[in-house]
Image (cartoon, rainbow, N blue to C red):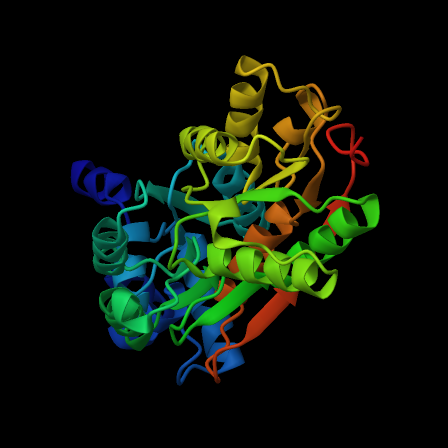
Amino acid sequence: MAGSHAVAERRPTLYDVARHAGVSLATASRVVNGSERGVGTSLRAKVLRSAAELGYVANAQAQALARATSATVGVIVHDITDPYFTEIALGAMAAADAEERLVTVCNTYGDPLREQRYVALLHAQRMAALVLAGSGHVDPSRDAGLAAEVASFQAGGGRVAMVGRHQIAADAVVPDNREGAERLGRALIDLGHRRIGVVTGPRGRATAEDRLDGLSAALAAGGAPLADDRVAAGDFGREGGARGTGVLLDRHADLTALVAASDQAAIGALSVLRSRGVAVPDDVSLFGFDDVPAARDITPALSTVRVPLRELGATAMRLALDGWTGAPRTTVLPTELVLRDSSRAPK
């Protein structure tokens, strides 16, 4: 009795399941690990019935190794404290949760080498899929290392989707930044603005270049071409927006409108305008880009170009999880101009 009691207390193994079902250990392993290869419907049912009768519980770590992926997916962002990336990550996490996936979020602090290392580390952890948020460089050679890591991840059976315009062989979800910037430029012309300053995003980044190019094209078409000295470099952040605004105000005291390449930069611009006694929108109209939640809450509420941030993240995650193995796909999501209290016609 003592011996049988000891056997009853022992956790059943996969070998026990195979013997109970009358199949090979390899067949039992394929069934409990979810493989469809070489196992018929009736045989699969037999193995699962044996596992249930014995009370067998599969080892999740062993399953992950057998499948070469896990139930975990990765989201890599430049700065999770930036509302732009927070919203994208929330969208990606919601889509992953709908598929009962656990999400690991990695923050690169805008460092391309760190981004590259994270892809390699998550590859080593056998992640099923990755979403990388943050636009690529206009010069493809600057993303060559990341492209190689993405290719290696996908060659190992993982799936990758990018958020933003890249020159990397992977699925991508791209907001129509250029078209949104063109709409903003036409709105400036229609309001009557001609003395316009722009604080850009980081030069060489596809998102920043697309937004500046679209705005410049619309202003030129409207008879108000954007001179080089009315453009100041920024970095999409609040501090960069503040610095760029200071540069523009020092150069041109007659500005009637200021466009920042992101809402965060526009918030920085607003602080400098206030500190110099420049009223928004009575003296200078202010515009951002992205429509992060804070854009509606600041005073005055910010006119901006709405980017569907959560939808970007959710769409990218769904692309990464759908098992597609064909040519890379690009999904373009529309943007929308939103005019609020921070803009008006010039005096």
Decide: is 152 above or below 54: below
Locate residue 245 relative to residue 240 in the image: left or right: right
Q: Position of residue 333 (x, y in %)?
A: 66, 61
**Quadrant in the picture for residue 193:** top right
Q: Is residue 179 visible?
A: no
What residue lies at 59% left-to-right and 50% top-to-bottom?
98
Decide: is 246 above or below 96: above
Q: Position of residue 38 (x, y in %)?
A: 40, 85
What residue lies at 39% left-to-right and 76% top-to-bottom?
169
Q: Nearer the viewer, residue 26 or 98?
A: 98
Q: Nearer the viewer, residue 248 or 42?
A: 248
Q: Position of residue 86 (x, y in %)?
A: 50, 37
Q: Number of labelled discs?
A: 0
Could you tell me which quadrant the N terminus lies in?
Answer: top left
Q: Is residue 46 visible?
A: yes
Q: Position of residue 153 (x, y in %)?
A: 29, 68
What residue lies at 70% left-to-right and 25% top-to-bottom?
283
Locate residue 222 relative to residue 91 in the image: left or right: right
What residue lies at 82% left-to-right and 44% top-to-bottom?
191
